[in-house]
Image (cartoon, helix red, strand yellow):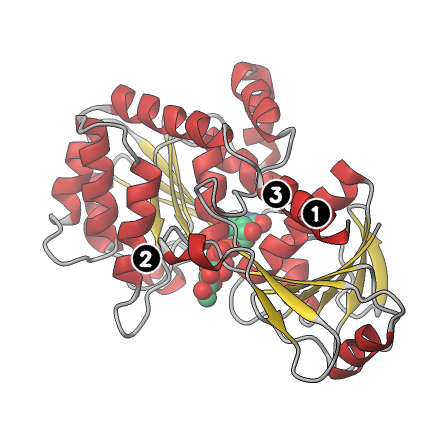
Amino acid sequence: MKWDIFCSVVDNYGDIGVCWRLARQLAAEYGFEVRLMCDDLQVFARICPGLDATAACQRAGGVEIRRWDGELHVAPAQVVLESFGCRLPEVYVEAMGRASAAPLWINFEYLSAENWVERCHGLPSRHGHLPLVTWFFYPGFTAATGGLLREAHLLRERDAFLADREVQVQYWRSLGLAPAARNLSLFCYGGAPLDAWLAELAAAPQPLRLIVPEGVANAELARWGLAVQAGSSVQHGGLSLVRIGLQDQPGYDRLLWACDMNVVRGEDSFLRALWAGRPFCWHIYPQQDGAHAAKLEAFLGRYLGEAGEGLARAAAVAFMRAWNGLDGAPDIAAAWRALQAQPAECAQFAAARAQHFAGGTDAAAGLVKFVREKLQ
Ligand code: TRH
């Protein structure tokens, strides 16, 4: 089966991150012929080293990658994915309307934990004047949604990595680092309460290493003497700050697995941190009207679920609320100390939540089932 996935890079790496991950999974696990049309190969190349940002057409990861600049004169595939409402090119839509069998047109939406997702998942919308229908596919946390993106082999690979000390030593070496007792990773937006948190880390009794990919928190970390280039590092008390290059997606997964705790941002890194089964903090993309607060609470509700009112759960909630500056949250230093007071419980809690969600459908499987039902 042939698939076309359209991706418009609006901001950051989330749009292309999700499309690239999904495209590879559809090709590798289902043997589909997948074309990924992307309108910003420069951004794409940051998380896919080796990609030629000037090439009109190339292959990577079993996927054909096309530069999408303006109109796109290609015959439509059987299944067409418009990611995140990116608006397909007009000539392409017209070609879809002329096809002898109308392609299945799916709008693949952002991951959200809010309740309305269940009502909107799977709804159709008729085209104004062409014999075409767009179907809305919402990934999500419940059985009434499209599921969460997760590769079939992901948790096996994670467990093999975590079970093999030598593989982990090699991993740290590949980053130019020696193994350290405790590692944290940081991928956040501007506006995070970094100064107070870093001061707390620097004063902590045990040494800590904080790994920060390039391009993250540059201004804030400059105040702490960390340069933006990969390879730079600086020491403050027991805290070692280290800058690494932006990793490819499998490399970023390994970083999340290798660290004792991760700060992540955006919906895709949120999910990768969840699958890592490590304690994490989600920095949600801040919106001017404050709409992110309800979204974060919905995510917290789903992620933390019915896991009871244990201390680890309460500490995770408090830290995420503090990090995101929600009303009534404790200050970040107090929230961090509470989280640190029970490392084993927090680790067990995060591992159990990953296990819990791994019991649900993965979004690629949900999507393929949806497509097969519609094409019958
Ligand atoms: O890049 P993001 O901040 O994207 C966000 C979200 O898409 C959000 O919905 C949108 O509203 C906002 O931008 C404007 O965060 P996200 O979604 O986690 O995407 C990051 C991608 O980058 C993800 O696929 C993981 C990948 N990544 C790497 O491949 N290597 C790395 O080293 C890092 C740090 C990330």
Q: Circle 1 is placed at which residue position? A: 373
Q: Quadrant of residue 52?
A: bottom right
Residue 238 in picture, x, y percent from top left? 27, 34
What residue sits 52% from the left and 43% below the top?
Answer: 147
Which three-letter amino acid code belongs to the residue tagged 2?
Lys
Instruction: Say whether residue 244 is visible.
Output: no
**From what the image shows, is residue 55 above or below residue 329?**
below
**Labelled pair 2, 3 in contact (Cβ < 8 Å):** no
Q: CA distance from mark 2 to mark 3?
A: 23 Å
Q: Circle 2 is placed at which residue position? A: 295
Residue 24 in picture, x, y percent from top left? 72, 46
User: Any mark on residue 366, and which?
Assistant: 3
- In terms of depth relative to the viewer, which is nearer, 309 or 158? 309
Local secondary structure at mark 2: helix
Q: Is residue 164 left or right of residue 6?
A: left
User: Any mark on residue 135, and which?
Assistant: none
In this rendering, the label closer to the viewer, 1 or 2: 1
The residue carrying pointer 3 sits among few (fewer than 14), some (14 to 19) or many (20 or more) residues within 10 Å by Cα, namely many
Local secondary structure at mark 3: helix
In this rendering, the label closer to the viewer, 2 or 3: 3
> How many labels, in total?
3
